[in-house]
């Protein structure tokens, strides 16, 4: 086993008297992909910021290639070969790919101080080609897809001869179907001997790409796991500090009448889909990106056009293409993009919570603020929303608590059917387990729940029944008893069903 | 207490009082009963307009066609008054005209997906052009006494129109903060997409905002006609759109669902005080625009700094 390229020993850091890192040891070797995981606040990003010189540590040492180093700022770290790609890219959208790669480099001027475009374009092309990217280096960055922009970031790091590449939530901004392409590039860098630190919340990815995983909890080392199949459970229990079996609570319960019946519904991205959900039942809807799961939810909810088919809520037909009709029937929908579709960040918890149910608080045209206050207080307590008070801006809440506010907003309508679309995306493991417990509790109370998710473990952990979609059609339906991950994955990638091949 | 002090409204109110004090000291003519009365009267028409435009800005929109809407509504209502139509019906006609033009603006912006700034720059020209063509550019004036006396009258020593502005302010503030519709305006202003996803028809709220704005301007137009005795079809309201917008912004109304109509009102008072004060100080006309601009800029900087601080310590 080779020596670590980068190593930290006993790193300590406090902010305003609060110790956030309590002696962290961390290492990554040449040609290794080292996962770094932990709940929000565990200290991952602080550690990375110390390594790259954005913060200075109060104690401990950083060793690079065996020598102690201190970087006064990130550019010095990059000069020796430690690059970081942040979740939010640092790119200039109005400049070309090549300019972005070499922007802060001085060796692209000729002796008159004029930019040597030929050399710059040539070098940029070579670097991107080596990464297997087919990009015109003259294109403006704003015209690129998110994945291509990420490639430009990687190219920037590679051009600085990165020996260590830190990737902070690299998949967060990517569409699901492009994550594999990103992995391909990451593996290529690994083969070239680059040490990669991979920070992510997504266990699926950690399991797939990392060689080892370092787990942090509350600013301490919780352990390092050599990754192989099945080890991901160990990682999760280390992160949350308890057994994984508690992670997905799943009560035995009996189902009631059918709350939602969808018959042969078609529309944009969806073809003749049928589905039934009973009260008290949690149905997991699994599919890869573009499989039609979100289209299904939006069509049922009346947010996008339904060209054929019928939707029944407790035997009453729901009018098509009207979110109002779906809402007043008793369907609630928590959309996948929390910041864009779920919450209004500038408003406070109170206002967000009652937003979908304003009419209930109206008396002779005037809002009943006292009634609102009491009701929201109830939600904050039931959902355990951690906040400084109802009047706190939602912007200041953590992802998990924001998601609970969105849940509160819909539960306030007392729905009979709750559709959750990727309810745990961008939420840390602690909040995830709370959301799973909430789903279980709501189902026990008789709510029908449709949970759309692209994470297999979560689908299998929470659902009573699993429906798999692919290319706008249902390709599998299973009672959730001992079905394997592979079964779901296979159904999710069955090319528009076996029918055509048979 | 601290919270109140940090509010943009309070800040601009203090700033306005400061400017007011400076003028009172620097000019003998400023702090006199006659001038204070004049000041409230000068404020009144724009003060009604700022309520409408303020709602539009909270919604994330902008209305640069306010001046042309004022001219058209005023010309139409004024003509009706001259023809002997009862005052109340003439005002109603003016208000309806304003509402219709607001509807046009709102519809173009939401249905044709034209940014509000571009749409209302265009309609500003179109509305004005149509008015000049129809009237041949003539003024609408010589209104009957019965009409003008109602508008120029005073109550408790201050212009009737000022009191009307206060009534509208109270009503609209109530609507904005204590009704469904008001909550929806703020919701759409901050995030139309989220609003849509919880069953709020964002386009409709947006259009309604423009319609209310048109109504306010239509009403203000008749007050203008009554106070000043004439509507110049080519000139009246030429700078209204930008003045009122500046007032709204200075008062802390922002394009993303932030601010209150009380703030916009205070902002409008500030601008009125500056204009009036500079004239009383006999500042050369060449300087008035520059100084007004500079003071508004100062208010905006205060606004921006305050917003930044507020963002930091929450």
Image (cartoon, coloured by chain):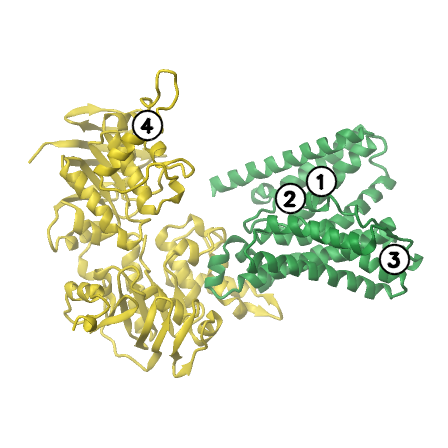
Helix, strand or loop at disc 2?
A: loop
In the picture shown, does residue A74 fall above or below B83? above
In this picture, residue A458 sits left or right of residue A5 = right
Q: Colour of chain A?
A: yellow
Q: Are marks 4 and 2 on the same chain?
A: no
In the foreground, B116 or A301: B116
Disc 3 target residue: B150
- Pointer 1 and pointer 2 on the same chain: yes
Vertically, is B215 above or below A215? below
The residue at the point 68 percent across, 34 percent down is B293
Q: Image quarter for residue A88?
A: top left
| Residue highlighted by disc 1 | B270
Mark earlier in primary sequence (1, 3)? 3
Q: Mark 1: which secondary structure?
A: helix
**Front in this rendered view, residue A52 or A153:** A153
Bin the neighbour count of mark 2 within 10 Å (Cα to Cα): few under 14, some 14-19, many 20 and up.
many
Q: CA distance from mark 1 to mark 3?
A: 27 Å
Residue A288, image quadrant = bottom left
In the rendered structure, the answer to whether residue B267 lies left or right of residue B143 reads: left
Nearest the viewer among A300 and A123 is: A123
Circle 2 sits on which residue? B251
**Residue pushed farthest left?**
A1
């Amino acid at each position: 086993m080779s020596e670590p390229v980068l190593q930290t020993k006993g790193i300590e850091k406090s902010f305003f008297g609060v110790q956030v890192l309590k002696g962290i040891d961390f290492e990554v070797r040449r040609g290794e992909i080292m996962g770094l995981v932990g709940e929000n606040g565990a200290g991952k990003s602080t550690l990375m910021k110390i390594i790259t010189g954005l913060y200075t540590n109060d104690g401990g040492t950083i060793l690079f290639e065996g020598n102690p180093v201190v970087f006064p700022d990130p550019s010095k770290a990059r000069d020796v070969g430690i690059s970081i790609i942040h979740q939010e890219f640092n790119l200039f959208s109005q400049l070309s790919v090549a300019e972005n790669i070499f922007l802060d480099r001085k060796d692209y001027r000729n002796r008159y101080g004029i930019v040597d475009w030929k050399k710059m374009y040539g070098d940029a092309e070579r670097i991107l080609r080596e990464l297997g990217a087919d990009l015109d280096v003259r294109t403006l960055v704003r015209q690129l897809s998110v994945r291509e922009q990420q490639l430009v970031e990687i190219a920037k790091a590679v051009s600085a001869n990165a020996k260590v590449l830190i990737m902070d939530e690299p998949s967060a901004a990517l569409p699901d179907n492009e994550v594999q392409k990103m992995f391909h590039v990451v593996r290529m860098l690994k083969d070239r001997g680059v040490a990669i630190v991979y920070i992510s919340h997504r266990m699926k990815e950690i399991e797939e790409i990392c060689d080892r995983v370092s787990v942090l909890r509350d600013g301490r080392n919780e352990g390092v796991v050599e990754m192989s199949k099945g080890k991901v459970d160990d990682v999760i229990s280390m992160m949350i500090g308890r057994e994984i079996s508690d992670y997905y609570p799943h009560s035995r319960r009996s189902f009631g009448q059918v709350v939602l019946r969808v018959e042969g519904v078609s529309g944009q991205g969806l073809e003749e889909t049928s589905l039934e959900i009973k009260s008290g039942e949690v149905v997991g809807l699994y599919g890869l990106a573009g499989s039609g799961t979100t289209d299904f939810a939006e069509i049922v909810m009346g947010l996008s056009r339904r060209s054929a088919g019928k939707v029944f809520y407790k035997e009453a037909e729901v009018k098509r293409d009207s979110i109002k009709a779906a809402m007043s029937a008793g369907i609630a929908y928590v959309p996948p993009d929390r910041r864009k579709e779920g919450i209004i960040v500038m408003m406070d918890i109170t206002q967000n919570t009652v937003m979908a149910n304003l009419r209930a608080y109206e008396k002779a045209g005037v809002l009943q603020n006292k009634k609102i206050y009491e009701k929201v207080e109830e939600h904050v307590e039931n959902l355990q929303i951690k906040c400084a008070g109802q009047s706190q801006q939602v912007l200041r809440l953590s992802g998990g608590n924001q998601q609970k506010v969105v849940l509160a907003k819909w539960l306030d309508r007392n729905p009979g059917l709750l559709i959750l679309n990727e309810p745990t995306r961008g939420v840390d493991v602690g909040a995830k387990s709370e959301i799973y417990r909430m789903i279980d509790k709501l189902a026990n109370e008789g709510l029908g729940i449709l949970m759309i998710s692209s994470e297999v473990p979560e689908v299998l952990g929470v659902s009573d029944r699993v429906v798999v979609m692919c290319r706008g059609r249902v390709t599998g339906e299973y009672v959730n008893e001992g079905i394997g991950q592979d079964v779901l994955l296979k159904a999710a990638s069955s090319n528009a069903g076996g029918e055509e091949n048979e | 207490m601290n919270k109140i002090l940090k509010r943009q409204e309070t800040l601009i109110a203090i700033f306005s009082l400061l400017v007011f004090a400076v003028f009172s000291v620097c000019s003998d003519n400023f702090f006199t009963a006659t001038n204070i009365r004049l000041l409230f009267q000068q404020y009144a028409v724009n003060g009604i307009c700022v309520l409408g435009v303020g709602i539009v800005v909270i919604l994330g929109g902008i209305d640069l066609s306010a001046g042309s809407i004022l001219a058209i509504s005023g010309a139409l209502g004024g003509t009706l008054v001259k023809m002997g139509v009862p005052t109340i019906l003439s005002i109603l006609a003016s208000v309806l005209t304003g509402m219709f033009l607001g509807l046009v603006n709102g519809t173009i912006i939401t249905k044709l997906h034209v940014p509000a700034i571009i749409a209302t720059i265009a309609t500003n020209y179109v509305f004005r052009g149509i008015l000049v063509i129809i009237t041949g550019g003539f003024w609408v004036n010589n209104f009957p006494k019965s009409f003008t006396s109602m508008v120029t009258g005073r109550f408790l020593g201050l212009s009737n129109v000022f009191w009307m502005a206060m009534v509208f302010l109270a009503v609209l503030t109530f609507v904005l903060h204590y009704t469904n519709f008001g909550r929806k305006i703020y919701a759409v202003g901050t995030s139309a997409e989220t609003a849509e996803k919880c069953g709020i028809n964002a386009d409709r709220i947006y259009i309604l905002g423009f319609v209310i704005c048109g109504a306010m301007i239509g009403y203000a137009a008749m007050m203008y006609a009554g106070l000043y005795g004439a509507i110049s079809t080519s000139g009246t309201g030429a700078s209204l759109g930008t003045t009122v917008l500046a007032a709204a912004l200075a008062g802390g109304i922002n394009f993303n669902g932030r601010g209150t109509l009380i703030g916009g009102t205070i902002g409008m008072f500030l601008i009125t005080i500056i204009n009036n004060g500079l004239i009383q100080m006999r500042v050369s006309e060449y300087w008035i625009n520059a100084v007004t601009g500079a003071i508004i800029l100062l208010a905006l900087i205060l606004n921006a700094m305050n917003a930044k601080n507020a963002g930091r310590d929450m």
